Amino acid sequence: MTTTPKAGLEGMIAGDTAIASVLQDKLIYRGYEIHDLAEHATFEEVAFVLLEGHKPSKSELTRFKDELIANRALPGPVKDFLKASRPMLREGTAVPMDVMRTCVSILGNLDHDAQSNEPEANLWKSKRLLAKMPTIIGHMQNVIDGKEFVAPETGGDAKLSHAANLLYLMTGEKPREDAAKVMDVSLILYAEHDFNASTFTGRVIAATLSDMHGAVTGAIAALKGPLHGGANEAAMEMLREVKAAVDGGMSVEDWMADAFEKKKKLMGFGHRVYKKGDHRAPILHALGRRIAARRGGEFLEYFTIGEQVQSIMETRKEIYPNVDFPCGLTYFAMDIPVAQYTPIFVASRVSGWCAHIMEQHANNRLIRPIANYIGEMPRAWG
Ligand code: COA
C-alpha cells in the first residue's frame, strides 16, 4: 500500500544523513550548532568538518588550507571559456549562475579523477572544486567589468582566507577586515542545509553512480531558481522595486498592501521547513547592518526599508525572512554585484553538496520513486 505524499514532498523524510540537521529550534552541521560556528569557526574549518567529518586539529587545518590555496588557479580552458562568456553575459543569454555551471562541467572534463567515485578521489575532487569556485566568480566578474583577470596564475593571494580572497579576486583590492569577516560568516551560514532542492538533486545524480562534477553541475542548476538560492538576488531586486516606489512618494506600508492584494510572493521570505524563522537570518542581518551603518547613505536606507518590509510581513502574515533576505541587503552593502550573489552561495554550498555526494556514494542505493499516475486510462491507438 503506497500513500501519496504532499505536493513538493513536504515533510517527507527522503533518507538518512550524518551531515546536517535542519530543525525548528536549531541548525546543526555534524553536531555543531550554527550560532556557535558563526561566532567561533572560520569557513575553512566548517568546510573541513563537512568534508572530512570531524573538527580539524591545528595541523589538519593547515594542511587543508594549503591544499585549497594550491588548487585555486583555473586551468586554461576554463579561463578561455570565461573570456568567451562576455557576450553571452552582456546579451543576457547567460547569467553568472549559468556560466559557473558550465565552468564546473569543463573542470570535470579536465579532472584526472573525474570518472572515479572512490572515496579518496571524491575527497580530492571536492577540495579542488571548493578551491576554484571563488576564482570562477572573481575571473567572471573581471570579464564583466572588462578588466584583466586578477591573479590568474595563482587564483589569488595565498595570505588571504577563502572569503577575503573571493572579494579580492572580484575587485583586485584587498578587502577591509569587517567585509572579509562578514563574507566568511555568510559562507558558513550557506554551507549546508540537509536535503534542500540542490543537495537532493546532487544526491539523485550521485545515486545513479554518476560522477561528482556532474552532480555538482546539476546542483548548481537547481540552486539557481528564485525559490531556492536565486532568492538572494530576487530579494534585492524586490527591494529595489520597493525603494523606487518609496523614492516616488509611496510608503512601504502601501507597497506591502498592494503586494498582499496582488498575492505577490515576497522574495527572501518563507521556508519549507522553518515555520518560525530561519536561524541564519538574524545572524547575517546583524552583521550586514553594521556594514550598512558604517557606510550610511543608500546602504542604510535599504536596510531600513528591508526592516520595515520584514516587520509588516511578520505582523500581517507571520512569515519570516529566510537567510537570503539579509544576504541580499548585506552583499549590496558590500558593493557585490547582484548577479554574483547566488554564485557566492555556490562557493559555499559546494562544501555541503560534496559531503552529501560522498555520503551517497559511500552507502548507495538508486533513488527512484514512483509517480501517482493521473493521466488517461489505457485506451486503443489503432
Ligand atoms: N511571500 C508571500 N507569501 C508567502 C511566501 C512569500 N515569500 N512564502 C509563503 N507564503 C505563503 C503562501 O502564499 C501560502 O499562503 P496560502 O496558504 O494562503 O496560499 C503559505 O504562505 C504557504 O506557502 P507555500 O508556498 O505553500 O510554502 P512552500 O513550503 O511551498 O514554499 C518557499 C516555500 C520558500 C518556496 C516559499 O516560501 C517562497 O516561495 N519564498 C520566496 C522565495 C524564497 O525566499 N526562497 C528561498 C528559500 S530559502
Image (tube, grey):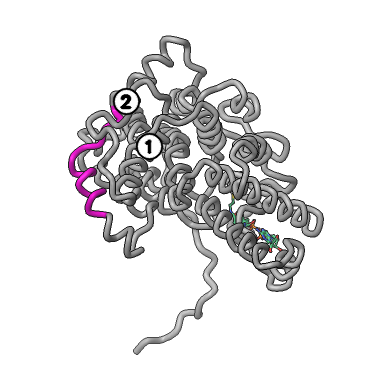
Q: Which mark is residue 32?
A: none
Question: The residue tagged with tag 2: helix, strand or loop?
Answer: helix
Q: Is residue 380 visible?
A: yes
Q: Which mark is residue 134?
A: 1
Residue 183, how many percent across, how many down?
A: 51, 34
Relative placement, left or right, of 57 versus 124 is right
Question: The residue tagged with tag 1: helix, strand or loop?
Answer: helix
Residue 184, how many percent across, how many down?
A: 51, 30
Above-or-below relation of 155 to 285: above
Quadrant of the snapshot with the C terminus: bottom left
Within 10 Å of disc 1 (Cα), the crowding (few <14, some 14-19, many 20+) is many
Q: Which residue is mark 2?
A: 120
Q: Which residues are magenta?
A: 71-85
Q: Is residue 2 visible?
A: no
The one nearer the camera, 195 or 299, is 299
Q: Amino acid at mark 1?
A: Pro
Judged from this view, the residue extending furthest toward the front is 297
Relative placement, left or right, of 143 versus 1 is left
Instruction: Give the mark nearer the N terminus: 1 vs 2.
Output: 2
